[in-house]
Image (tube, rainbow, N blue to C red):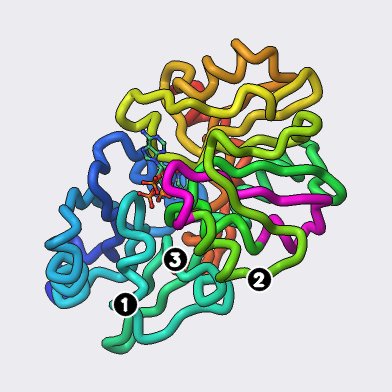
Amino acid sequence: MPDVSSGDPAGFDRYGVIGYPVSHSRSPVIHQLFALQTGQQLRYELLQVAPEKLEQAVRQFQRTGGKGLNVTVPHKTAVTDLCDQLSERAEQAGAVNTLAFQDGEIFGDNTDGIGLTRDLEWNLGFPLQGRRILILGAGGAALGIVGPLLARRPAALVVANRTRDRADAVVKRFGHGMLSACAFDDVPAEAPYDLVINATSAGLKGETPPYPDAAVGAGTLCYDLSYGSKPTPFMLWSRDQNAGAAVMGWGMLVEQAAESFHLWRGIRPSTAPVLKQIVVSA
Ligand code: NAP
């Protein structure tokens, strides 16, 4: 007898990703591959929801038996208000990328930071300790990665944002001596950074903001949180600056998804084969 309370005719547990826009998301493919690999039965949906409908959509998903949601641009900070409980890392970030619905309550977690540091250190062999790091952007994704990056003890961490106030707010939130804020045209660049992370959503709209040229040199790794089947505008800009290397955020996407999957299902999938598969099929 199928479990009709789950809202799924086959009785599969339901998950999804909520965002605006969300059609570009590869999370459904990744979670289906994890499910296949670990023998779990679940469905994973795309929920395109405008900011003013966020609460209604989350509560409806919960009411109809949904088990968990990933949260993407631009909802990561707003969704914290809907959570009954937050993990320590979500509390620290003030941003949530994973919701788990349990016993009528909403638990919020943030797996973005661990996803990024695992990709950089484990997959790309780029140790973070002692590095000078620049983050471009101060939205929900930037909030999620600052804490885990600081925990790796970089030499400096600068947050630059189009809207300076938002970068200031990130620094105030974390209150760490290694962290500073500035606007794009104000980036301290006495020497190129070891790592420049694009955490803006500009690429989603095909835009290339005036990123700070002097921040990039031959020894810089440019890492775009955004990803696509073709090089993103930030990747193209990085190559124009003769960056040492430029990569898209596929690895982070798979690593953060694995951490969400672990939270939801209690099983940690193996990420390497899934990463290989989604990059090849992009
Ligand atoms: P968000 O909360 O909406 O923040 C957007 C950020 O982008 C803000 O800092 C905003 O600056 C900046 N921005 C947008 N358009 C811009 C433009 N034309 N010029 C300069 N700055 C611009 O979004 P988010 O949740 O942080 O997500 C950011 C990006 O990271 C998205 O593309 C998302 O897909 C990606 N992401 C990827 C992963 C992964 O696993 N690979 C994980 C998380 C996020 P203002 O403050 O000035 O508006």
Report the Cα–Cα distance between label 2 and label 1: 22 Å
Q: Which residue is mark 2?
A: 175
Q: Which residue is mark 3?
A: 95
Are there few (<14), some (14-19), or many (20+) residues within 10 Å of tag 1? few
Task: Point out the tag, 2 or 1, that comes first from the N-terminus.
Answer: 1
Secondary element under disc 2, as helix, strand or loop, is loop
User: Residue at 36% of width from left, 25% of height from top?
Assistant: 207
User: Residue flagged by tag 2: what amino acid is it?
Assistant: Gly
Q: Say whether marks 2 and 3 touch (CB < 8 Å).
A: no
Q: Write the start and end of the magenta stretch as one range.
A: 148-166
Side of 135 relative to 191 (left or right): left
Residue 226 visible in the displayed image = yes
User: Residue at 31% of width from left, 70% of height from top?
Assistant: 67
Above/below status of 21 relative to 35: above
Above/below status of 219 relative to 274: above
User: Residue flagged by tag 3: what amino acid is it?
Assistant: Ala
Measured as percent of width and height from the top left, residue 176 is found at 71, 67
Quadrant into which the C terminus falls: top left
Does the stretch in magenta take in 152?
Answer: yes
Front residue of 236/3: it is 236
Report the Cα–Cα distance between label 3 and label 1: 10 Å
Q: Is mark 3 within 8 Å of ligand 1?
A: yes
Front residue of 107/239: it is 239
Measured as percent of width and height from the top left, residue 191 is found at 80, 30
Give the quarter of the image for residue 229. Answer: top left
